[in-house]
Image (cartoon, coloured by chain):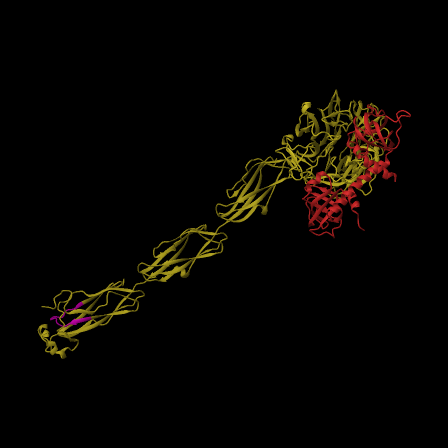
Amino acid sequence: MAVSVQDLTDRSSFVFEGAVRRIGAVTTAGLQPTRDIAVVQVRKILKGPAVLSGFTGREITVQLHEHETVREGLRALFFANGLLFGDGLAVREVGRVDSGGPQLEKQVEDAMRRASDEALLDRLVRAELVVSGLATETRRYESESAARLPISEHDPEWWECVIQVESVEKGKVKTAEKGKQAPREVVTLFANSVDIAWYGSPKFPTGTKGIWLMQRIELRGKPVPGLVTVHALDFQPLSEMERIRALLKRAER
Amino acid sequence: MDIFVINMIPKSLSGETNQDSEPSVAVDLANPLHIAATAFTPDPLSGPLAPIYASSDGGHSWELNLIIPGAGTNPVVGSYFPTNDVTLRFGWTSNILYAGILRADTFEQLNILRTTNYLSATPMTILESRPSDDQPYVQAATVPSGPGAGNDRFYVGSSDHALSNIPAVADVSLDAATPSPVITRFVLEHRTVSRDGFQCRPAIHANGTIYAGFYSLIGGPTSCDVVIVRDDNWASGASPFTALIDPGDSKPGLRIVTGVNNPFLGLNIGQQRIGGDLSVAVDPRNSAKVYICWGDLQGSTYTLHVRKSADSGATWSSADIRTISNATNPALAINSEGKLGFLYQQVAGPSSSQRWETTIELTSSDFASFSTHLLANTPAATPASTFQPYLGDYLYMMAAGRDFYGIFCANNTPDKANFPNGVVYQRNANFATQTLLAVDDVTTVPVSIDPFFFKVTVGPSRVTTSIANSGSFGDVCLGSFVDELLTIDNSGSGPLFISNIVSSSPDFLAPEVISYPLKVRAGDSVNLVIRFQPSSFGSKSGTITIFSNAPAGPHKVNVSGTAQAPRLSLVIANKGSFGKACVGCFADEPLILSNSGRCALSVTAIASSSTEFLVPEVLSYPLTISAGDSLPVPIRFEPASFGLKSATITVTSNDPASPSIVNVSGNAPSGKIAVTGSTSFGGVNAGCCADRTVSICNVGDCNLHVTGVRFKRKSHHWSLLHNPFPATLHPGSCLGVVVRYKATEKCPRSCELVIESDDPVTPIKVLDVLAYTVWDGCGCKENCEDCRKGCCQKHKECCQQGYPCCSDDDDGGENGEEPGPA
């Protein structure tokens, strides 16, 4: 059964065009050369972290998913994940597609874009409230006592962010005063902690402008008292408004 | 003392800029070359497995092996993380690696993991899982003897969020290596508390004594107690961890110190949050001897305190045995000799340019005296913190035998000055420009926080050596040499400093070392070349002596070898006899110079004792004859005189028996004269002449040089009608001489024919020639006047022998003598 580029891209964090140089050989000391391992020269990286960008043009070790169909000289698009990082780089192949030039590259790019959209769409669907606006005030969440030791150093340190709403994209926002449309304000909780568990969670200094996706979540088995914006995708710049609106329309369908 | 420090980021990740903080390390005591470590280092490809740092060479090289489950996108935060907290430990003899982690993909979920091969790509097996926990801190052991001998046991201290008072707990397995180990969680807190601190630190002794230390927040974070619990039988009884009863409240868990003001996340120093430090270590030689280190605020200064108990934790030193201010991340470890190691990270310097100093102190006297070793001295303000913990809420150090192994995190600027005891970088770095470089070794990479592994080798060094063939270099030819590698292995546990290597024999050359001492780390070895270059022939032996700091003193290596000699054999036909050779001629015979030895023969001279035996002219000595080869040399016998000849031919070479002499001989025979034919004429009628032919022959082997044939005296009566001499007579040849007698003399007189030659025997041969004149009627009576008057013609018939010769007037006489008697 043919595997789609979309599926391979979704399941791989390292996608590259490469040429098989040697079968049964390795480029790093930590692996034994076996029949299902090959040395592949990376010709172009289509998906991967910046830290590995220097491997373009270099040889890496690939633990092959299907080694029977590999021959030296084969040029293909390799879909892989990490295996070993030593003197050299070794990756574990998820799948492989014969090289197809720009068209195939575009398929990968499209797959990555679709995956990104799906992830944001998922957050939008989950969100109770989506607004754009301006952070006018941030403050420690009152329930959090400075004197009390947090459960762990991985606590979120809840803070509140007061948002002056410019537009409501999903959900309902109560008006500040009945009968008047503006100004409208909402409050979202955010994790002010810079602990390793939370530093990737968005922070909202006063003056921040953007689009907030507010969720109700549980933490350590208990509901967090209030809407929160803690997921990395739950805060988007205003430049993403059209995309968000399109995704919300798509969600409505 | 030897200190080895290495930046653990592998070369393939030279471009990484993660804040790789909060390290842990585990050394396999059954094989200290096997070491595993962790930090907040993600899979660069953001996969579902977090990496361990794996080394199989004692920490000299490291790679990232993705085997820890639980990495991934935090469902709450939506960002990718490796794990949150993680610690590692090996079973003591099982080679099994255990880990306690907080998963990232399920947020604070505790996992206890296991692998039998930390170098394989197989993910670790999950043994235990609990929803919410903090700082799982694993210690593991293998029961050395008694009940349960051989069983792996682990003790994972943590802070359990499931209970309202968030107590210190320990997850214990007494059969950790079995397929489905039983894991039991024990609450260590027995008092009513608001909660306990984040840390719970177990420590294991081989006799089954288990300690665990934690903070008990009875009065809140600003007034907490440092508590230690103990179990005396592997926590296998009904009431584990209750062996220590506090005399103040009779509750399990002895309060070492109370009212401690711990900031618990309320303080940062050098960008690092202070979350409560705790370390416990037990002396492997004596389970009653236990140390603890905690931290608190002394005024506004965060301070580490070290205290000791010598009675299994029942009582503790009332005062600190060591106090360090502005420091965090303590780790205590005790080696096999009872030496205490104390690792910590201290902020030092003015606030504008603070630095993190990572230090290990070693003491055998509870800090009455101690040595201090600065492992790293790095900027505290850079790089800017990405998250907390900046360096880690803990680090780790353990002892294996005499040695201490540890791990810490620090600014990774490649600056030698930052690492006073040296450092090795795996990732690309330019120490000259103090620049990190990416995989391409060109692109600069920003400074970040990296994990650094270190090993402190404490014990003595020990020299062991190996050399091929037990030091026998075999056969070597003179003028040549053979090299052998002498491997000097430091099989001790301390660094080896070789101060000199000397040879007792000039035939065995020790290596030239540019600069002593040579340093060989524990477990390392160095190969040096020993050269056997004999200066003379024969069996040789010597001793290579290695002078070092090894307690056993100079190490001696016996060496031997044989300097093989070439062997000259002289061979010549007929025992050196050249036979006969005439003077002026020559005879050649080859003298065979044969090298029957195993090394090349070098002939430097060939000489003859006689000019009649000529050796060849050699334009340039030496002549080289390979082993087993031979060289014919022509010897010429060229006699200059007659007779038997002899001489000695002397061959000078590098054969130890040189010179070699061979006797030669030859014969230079002469010609030998022999004369045939009668020289007695008898009577010849007057006026007649008679002839006789005398043959002069050479009956010798060589030419006879007849230099002259003449009459001794001049006489009118005798003459030589034919005289071919001087002439050379070849062997066997003859030449005739015709002698004439003219019968005119009145009185018979003999004459002597003289033959001169080079016959050495008869150089002058004299022949008497005899004749007389017959004066009778026939013929001339008075004198030869008659003949001139035709008498002879008239009396031709009168010459009874000979022929008339009156007219043959040759009276001029020979030799000027009178023609006849008066």
Residue A142, percent across and down?
85, 24
Residue extending farthest bottom: B797
Taking depth in this image into account, of A181 and B179 the one nearest to the observer is: A181
The quarter holding residue B249 reads top right
Taking depth in this image into account, of B524 and A148 the one nearest to the observer is: A148
Residue B347, percent across and down?
70, 26
Q: Is residue B184 something one can see in this rendering?
A: yes
Left or right: where does residue B442 sit relative to residue B217?
Answer: left
Residue at x-position 40% and y-position 61%: B574
Q: Colour of chain A?
A: red
Q: Give the overall secondary structure of the magenta segment.
A: loop
Residue B681, percent across and down?
18, 73
Q: What is the span of residues highlighted in magenta in the rendered image? A: B739-751
Quarter that holds the N terminus of chain B:
top right
Asked if the magenta segment contains residue B5, the reply would be no
Q: Colour of chain B?
A: yellow
Asked if the magenta segment contains residue B740, the reply would be yes
Residue A101, percent across and down?
72, 47
Q: Is residue B363 something one can see in this rendering?
A: no
Left or right: where does residue B621 sit relative to residue B62?
Answer: left
Residue extending farthest top: B299
Taking depth in this image into account, of B120 and B724 the one nearest to the observer is: B120
Quarter that holds the C terminus of chain B:
bottom left
